[in-house]
Image: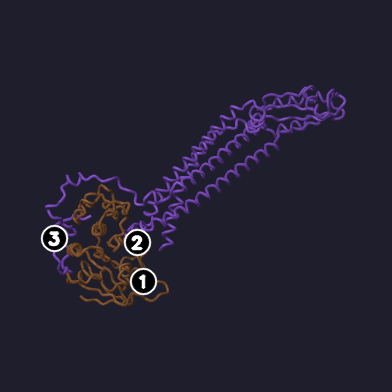
Amino acid sequence: MARIQKTSPGAGSAGKPAGSRKPAKRRIQKPRATAPTPQSTNSTKLRPTAPIVPPQSVAGRALTLVVAIMSFLACLTVGAVSIVWDAADAWQNDLVREITIQIRPVDGIDMLREIDKAVALTQEFPGIGAVRALSDAETKALLQPWLGEGLDLEGLPVPRLIQIIVDDPGRLDLIQLRTAIGDNISGASLDDHSVWTARLSAMAGAVVLSGIAVMALVLASMILSVVFATQAAMAGNRDVVSVLHFVGAEDTFIAREFQRHFLVLGLIGGISGGLCAIACFVLLDMVTRQTTGQAGSDQFSALFGSVSVSLPGYLGVFGVVFIVAVLTALTSGLAVKAHLAKGD
Amino acid sequence: MIRFENVGLRYGMGPEILRDLSFDIAPQSFQFLTGPSGAGKTSLIRLLFMSLKPTRGLIKVFNRDMSQIGKQEIPILRRKIGVVFQDFRLLDHLTTYENVALPLRVVGKDEADYRADVMELLRWVGLGERMHVLPPVLSGGEKQRAAIARALITRPDILLADEPTGNVDPPLARRLLRLFIELNKLGTSVIIATHDIALLEQVDARRMVLADGRLSIFD
């Protein structure tokens, strides 16, 4: 800005302006008597510069609450997906670490000898921890619900089972083991529970996809709410936008001014929702621990394990809070630009 | 600096409210734009300020054909033009100081760099003691001077003032007029839109008279 020099507006005299005169030096002089000394300039205290767009005119508590609720729901979804994912992972691990050999009775073949051969053969494979043929008593116990007490295994063609505990699933070559068992043991087949693990994987994948879909819907609702709120804020600040335009503000500057408010709003809403969700997770964990041993909770634990949100779940909550804040700011910025473009 | 050639303007499908306007705004010139109420003075000011596009004719602003100026360039060109509106258009939630500093803020200047200049200008227009006050507390004359200060803070090449004395008493109107003359002497082209005959009689300057959508110029 020009230094203000020479005469004050009140001191000048009216007359024809000199259109042909050489352009004067663009420094407006101020009378010496009123010239502010550096001391007087510095001594004037100013309040911290107020935001160009008044915060109270942008969006009220309602939008913050909407963002908080959406963030809360998105965080709950992340937590639920995390619980199911962990449970599915645990089930899969248990299944992968245990495989079974079934030996069916074949005419003319001594089944007990085949069992011993199968146990010996299996133990030679790398990655195998323990191999154990189910005893007569255990086999009877397995059949008892269907065939009743006092079962004579010698008189019935009952298949026998060999339980194999896998120490290191990475080292075990299941295909080779299956081939070896099939080739060398009469009436034997290997069951690695792959049908179950495939189903569990599919279920876990479906739960994750559903979680992503729910989160996408929640975030889409939030984005629409922010778009409406931004449009309302723009309408409410039409005068501010008009003034900013005629003082030479670019659309990006105006969008940034609005965006700043929405980023703060998104952060407040997102953090509030995230904290509420974390409180829910902690509460769920506490309730689960306290009810351990009760009939219902034991079945629930058998299905879902510890029913507590793991570290990735909590990290997911922070991710949701970040996404909510960034989405709120970005959406409002784009909505302002679209509004300004439409106004031209 | 600004050149109009056969410019016409109509709103929507309505009648043409400005017809065949041809004139130049020379550097460091001073002119009044006058005419009866509703003659189109404000529309012409808006055309000069690139806030409206003509329905026909050619407008050159700083040697640039307005029809060729991109949307992104308009704010940059507007920074060379200061505007004082009849209704001041001060932002009520900002202090006088913040309102005057607004054009510098939108170009990204740091407050520490412009603080002294803004204070100096406010003192020059007689608002040194009112810089912390919000516009609703200011009188009409004070608002007018704050609006003028805001238009001048970026040292514009052209100053457009729409009825700048419409809300002030005659002594203050004379003071404001002297302020515009002083600015013009310092190199700014000034265009004052007014229908205040008393104001026109005080200065022997070029007069652009709008009537029935047509412009007559008296040098």
Callout 2 crowding tier (Cα within 10 Å): few <14, some 14–19, many ≥20: few
Chain under numbered label 1: B
Q: Colour of chain B?
A: brown
Q: Amino acid at mark 1?
A: Pro
Q: Nearer the viewer, mark 3 or mark 1?
A: 3
In the image: residue A126, left or right of residue A8: right
Residue position marked by numbered label 2 in the rendering = B73
Residue position marked by numbered label 3 in the rendering = A11
Residue A126 in view here: no
Name the foreground residue: A256 vs B172. Answer: B172
Q: Colour of chain A?
A: purple
x and y percentages locating residue B111 in the rendered image? 27, 48
Residue A197 in view here: yes
Residue position marked by numbered label 1 in the rendering = B54
x and y percentages locating residue A89 in the rendered image? 62, 34
- What residue is at 20 percent from the left and 56 percent from the top? B125
